[in-house]
Image (spheres, helix red, strand yellow):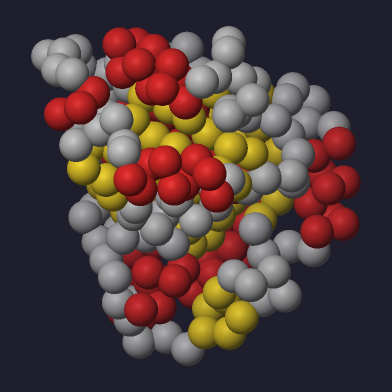
Amino acid sequence: MYPDLDQLRQIVINTAQEHLPHRFATIKSRWKADGSLLTEADLIMQKQINESLTTYWPQFAFLGEEMDEIQQTQLLLDTTQGVWCLDPLDGTRNFAAGIPCFSVSLALIVKQEVVIGIVYDPLRDECFSAQKNQGAWVNEKVLGEIYPHEPLNNGIGLIDLKRLPAGLAARLATCPPYSSQRSLGSVALDWCWLAAGRGHVYLHGRQKIWDYAAGSLILKEAGGYATTLLGESVFKPTLQPRSAVAALKKEFFDEWIAWLGINL
């Protein structure tokens, strides 16, 4: 039996509201060996959420972004009993710089698939969540409404150019198939905003499991579509970065993968 989704949402919301807003744009940061940013907020969020999850659901292992890579790898070798996967602060650079676009992302992985996903934006007080085969929500609103179809050339692309192959990035920069482009700086929110219809297509060249695990389930349960640039399933229980190509509507997805030349 999976954990209660309402209880999980409340743990993430309460912890984020306690530790993030008053540290926003005021906290000191340092660079990690992989070139990413680390703040006190990342560490305290990971510690507090880990403690709460262990208290209520000790049967599940815990994997956090700020853990040792060897330990992370070991945890993903066998997810039969269940493994929590947490990004305690997705969008740390935004958070440290005072850009109000960051989130907390929590997923539960069981038998090599994501069964629960929660992404919380504390500044907007928006909690996106999903459970396998049960649907997806933002706060109390069900995600997955049928939006009127319009051509992709009128749409918005949520695109991270810097992690793409140079040729593809140049092609998108000079002759994109959509009307305008955004890059939020929080991968988890990219997935959720797509699920909420705030963008039409999505592309990211390299994201880690804690970035996309929760968000990819939320989009899927909202009725969305996703693949990698190689035409594979996006989710894979590995530390190796994965590319992601996605859309909420089948019409957009088909146009998008055709433009990118992906064979499914």
Question: Could you say which is closer to the camera, residue 135 or residue 93?
Answer: 93
Nearest the camera: 12 or 68?
A: 68
The quadrant in which the C terminus is found is top right
Residue 217 x %, y % = 49, 27
Q: Position of residue 203 (x, y in %)?
A: 44, 37
Give above or below for 3 relative to 23.
Answer: above
Q: Quadrant of residue 159?
A: top left
Quarter of the picture containing the N terminus is top right
Give x and y (percent) for residue 178. 25, 33
Q: Residue at x 87, y 46 (%)?
A: 74
Q: Which residue occupies the foreground of this view, 56 or 221?
A: 221
Residue at 78 percent of width and 31 percent of height: 79
Quarter of the image for residue 77 reads top right
Q: Nearer the viewer, residue 218 or 225?
A: 225
Which residue does the image show at 33% across and 64% down from the upper left? 17
Answer left or right for 85 relative to 96: right
Drawn side of residue 264 relative to residue 7, left or right = right
Residue 84's place in the image compared with 113, above or below, is below
In this orientation, does residue 260 appear? Answer: yes
Does the image show residue 188? no
User: Is residue 191 rendered to the left or right of residue 62?
Assistant: left
Q: Say whether residue 60 is left or right of residue 52.
A: right
